[in-house]
Image (cartoon, rainbow, N blue to C red):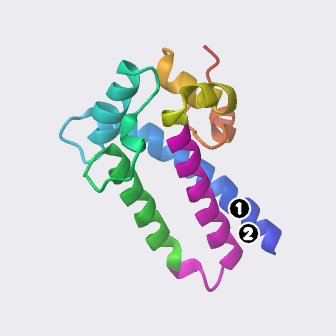
Amino acid sequence: MAALQILAALLYANLGEWLMHKYLLHGLGKNPDSIWAYHWHQHHRICAEQGMRDPGYSSLRWTWNAQTKEMAVLALIVTLHLPLALDLPFFVLALYASLALYYYKHRRAHLDPDWAKRHLPWHYQHHLQAGNGNWCVTWPWFDYVFGTRLNN
């Protein structure tokens, strides 16, 4: 039962990354008036100007920028799934571990582009090469499932 919950959480988290990135952050986020606009109009612009680097990740200052908005979304996801903890404890723990790993990898990718190019080439390509895909950050699983893993 624990292994099934963990597997389900890993797949759920990766699917969530894919859906949120494609439809919220890029779909709705291209509208400058959207609550999701920070991703496209701040994070992507800065990464394009600085070769994948986003200095906003270099410190955890509590300013309302793309990084703190990302952390707020992650905190909301944690909060929304907390009621499941009693019935599906391994699912919730694995989901929380996935969220922490996502944040670690995403932050490191934008502080160390050489590391990103080696360890997260799909995310590196998402930022620095033309194309509309590579929506996953942590693992490219659902990019492969949905045919959006681009090797430019």
Amino acid type of the residue tagged 1 in the rendering: Ala
Residue 113, placed above or below residue 36: above
Q: Residue at x 58, y 39 (%)?
A: 136
Q: Quadrant of the N terminus?
A: bottom right
Numbered circles on residues, count: 2
Tell me, yes or no, whether the highlighted magenta stretch contains residue 85: yes
Amino acid type of the residue tagged 2 in the rendering: Gln
Of residues 12 and 129, the one nearer the viewer is: 129
Q: Residue at x 36, y 40 (%)?
A: 56
Q: Quadrant of the C terminus?
A: top right
- Prevailing secondary structure of the magenta residues: helix
Query: Of helix, strand and loop, which one carries label 2?
Result: helix
Question: Which residue in the protein does label 1 denote?
Answer: 8
Query: Of helix, strand and loop, which one carries label 1?
Result: helix
Question: Which residue in the protein does label 2 denote?
Answer: 5
Stretch of the chain drawn in magenta: 83-108
* Position of residue 145 in the picture relative to residue 109 (left or right): right
Counting from the top left corner in percent of width and height, residue 139 is at: 66, 41
Counting from the top left corner in percent of width and height, residue 126 is at: 52, 26
* Position of residue 25 in the picture relative to residue 93 (left or right): left
